[in-house]
Amino acid sequence: MADIERKEVLYCEVCTLPPEFCEFGTTLEKCKQWLQKEHPEEFEKLYSTGEGIEEKMGKATLDDKPAEEEKKPVKSKNLSKAEKELQKKQNAKVFIERVERNKRKCVTSVLGLEVFDIDLKKAAKIFANRFACGSSVAKNKQGLDEIVVQGDFSEEIRDLILENWSVVPENNIEFVEKKKKKATPA
């Protein structure tokens, strides 16, 4: 077997931990006094009297930044919350989709109004009253809320949105038409 060299481990007589771990105990001041009295060289290593860790930690602030970070350009993360919301609304689209069901029946779905802080239930009620048809809020395949209006009212819904909600820009409204695929004979 190889010769194993034994190391002497110093334990504090106050808290019975090694001196490096005395700070985690409840008697740190008593441990420091004991260590300074019994083992001054170990005390110097851990708690040096020069500009040590404690003094450096006392001087450290959150405002201290390296010079490199100060030179970096301001990124979009620093934009205010209101500016982000405004940018999000300007980039958002409202999709008016005409979906053909069976034969000559179709429904119109409106997706994207919630981005402009429009209450979808109230909007569905306005559509139902204006067009004298059924209208409801439903989840689509992607899990997003959309307004489903029975009938083909694509152009009329666009005009009604622009009339009632001025926060929706006219160029942010897009039309989509989905037709049901015909079954191919085998």
Image (tube, grey):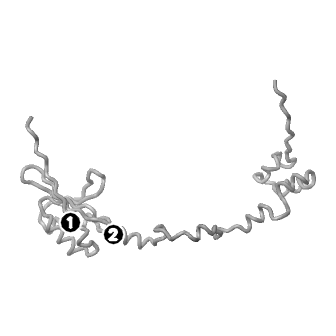
Q: Name the spot of residue 106 as percent of width and height, x first.
A: 12, 55
Taking the image as shown, residue 139 lies to the left or right of residue 29, namely: left
* Front-lying residue, 36 or 184: 184
Q: Name the spot of residue 111 as percent of width and height, x first.
A: 25, 61
Q: Which quadrant holds residue 11?
A: top right
Number of numbered discs visible in the structure rendering: 2
Q: Within 10 Å of the Cα at label 2, are there few (<14), some (14-19), or many (20+) other Cα atoms? A: some
Distance Cα–Cα, label 2 vs label 1:
23 Å
Q: Secondary structure at mark 1?
A: helix
Q: Which quadrant holds residue 184?
A: top left
Give the position of the C terminus as an image quadrant.
Answer: top left
- The tag on residue 183 is none
Tell me: residue 7, above or below residue 29: above
Taking the image as shown, residue 182 lies to the left or right of residue 165, namely: left
Identified by mark 1, the residue type is Lys
The tag earlier along the polypeptide, 2 or 1, is 2
Q: Name the spot of residue 172 as percent of width and height, x first.
A: 26, 68
Taking the image as shown, residue 78 lies to the left or right of residue 166, namely: right
Q: Within 10 Å of the Cα at label 1, are there few (<14), some (14-19), or many (20+) other Cα atoms? A: some
Taking the image as shown, residue 140 lies to the left or right of residue 100, namely: right
Residue beneath the point at 54% across and 69% down: 72
Q: Name the spot of residue 69 as percent of width and height, x first.
A: 59, 67
Q: Secondary structure at mark 2?
A: helix
* Front-lying residue, 134 or 44: 44
- Residue that lies at the very extreme toward the top in this rendered image: 1
Give the position of the N terminus as an image quadrant.
Answer: top right
Identified by mark 2, the residue type is Lys
Residue beneath the point at 20% across and 65% down: 125
Q: Which quadrant holds residue 148?
A: bottom left
Residue position for label 1:
125
Residue position for label 2:
89
Which callout, 2 or 1, points to the residue nearer the camera?
2
